[in-house]
């Protein structure tokens, strides 16, 4: 068995049609505290992070119809999109996954909201899209 | 804003075609330690729990074609199925969600693998199927 590069889950990403309506549900009704909200056209989304205790929920509203999240929403509707794991060394983790023959969306890390990120293709992981995050605190 | 009944995430449930093949990926390649494995015909699944640090991954292979997980698999393919949150009082939590007008799969809790469980309908929560768990340690 390979030692896991994954330290813990940072967040669960959920694609929604309308961020305000989703916040009315997850913050207003379900009571998850809002941590931050961003307009992120460089990532093709408006997004919000909510505190779910041991991890965060990330709500993603696609604002660019050509983005991956927009295509996901059109194809599958609202719902869980990815699970993000913290890794200490994203280059080493990607190298390990690549060596194991796992299909990667990103061969190289790219800048995300909270650090360097990369996605594993869900066809490699039984439909669970995994995001790797090497955190870089501001 | 309503105080949240949800304490933290217990596990993320992932529906798969074949539990052995999924374990070969999640345990063998990705390195998540196997915690427990059950043949649970009373729940219509073979299942395994893996340690993902701050929560667990639950792999679910439907073994009863009439079950909810089997219908999910037929309709949507492999992938994330639900997120399970620990609550301290599942009856009070369900009462609160019901009062808020949220559609519930289970109006009353029922016995799960690790305690009393109930599901909120994903149409109430932007496609994210939420499981409530009031843990009862053996």
Image: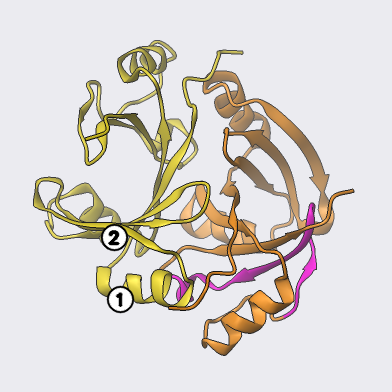
Chain colours: A yellow, B orange
Q: Residue at x 52, y 73 (%)?
A: B3
Say whether residue A84 is visible. Answer: yes
Q: Which residue is mark 2?
A: A73
Residue at horizontal 55 percent and vertical 57 percent from the top? B82
- Of badges 1 and 2, the one in the foreground is 1
A121 w.r.t. A3: above or below = below
Q: Quadrant of residue B57?
A: top right
| Mark 1 neighbour class, 10 Å CA radius: few under 14, some 14 to 19, many 20 or more | few
Q: Residue furthest front?
A: A138
Residue tagged by mark 1?
A21
Q: Which of the chains bears the disc numbered 2? A: A
At horizontal 67% and vertical 45% (from top left) the residue drawn is B61
SS at circle 1: helix
Look at the image and tell me in which quarter the C terminus of chain A lies: top left
Q: Relative to residue A54, is residue A48 depicted above or below?
A: below
Magenta stretch: residue B117 in it? yes
Give the residue at x 26% y 62%: A74
Q: Is residue B63 left or right of residue A113?
A: right
Element under disc 2: helix
On screen, residue A76 versus residue A65, left or right, reads right
The chain that hosts pointer 1 is A
Q: Mark 1 or mark 2: which comes first in sequence?
A: 1
Examine the structure image and report whether residue B113 is included in the region drawn in magenta. yes
Residue segment shown in magenta: B108-125
């Amino acid at each position: 068995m390979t030692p896991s590069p994954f330290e813990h889950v940072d967040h669960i990403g959920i694609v929604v049609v309308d961020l305000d309506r989703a916040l009315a549900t997850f913050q207003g009704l379900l009571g998850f505290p809002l941590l931050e909200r961003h307009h992120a056209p460089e990532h093709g989304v408006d997004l919000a992070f909510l505190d779910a205790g041991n991890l965060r929920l990330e709500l993603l509203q696609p604002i660019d119809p050509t983005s991956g999240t927009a295509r996901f929403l059109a194809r599958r509707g609202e719902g869980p999109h990815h699970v993000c794991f913290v890794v200490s060394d994203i280059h080493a983790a990607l190298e390990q996954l690549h060596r194991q023959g796992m299909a990667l969306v990103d061969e190289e890390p790219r800048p995300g909201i909270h650090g360097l990120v990369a996605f594993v293709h869900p066809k490699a992981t039984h439909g669970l899209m995994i995001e790797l995050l090497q955190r870089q605190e501001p």
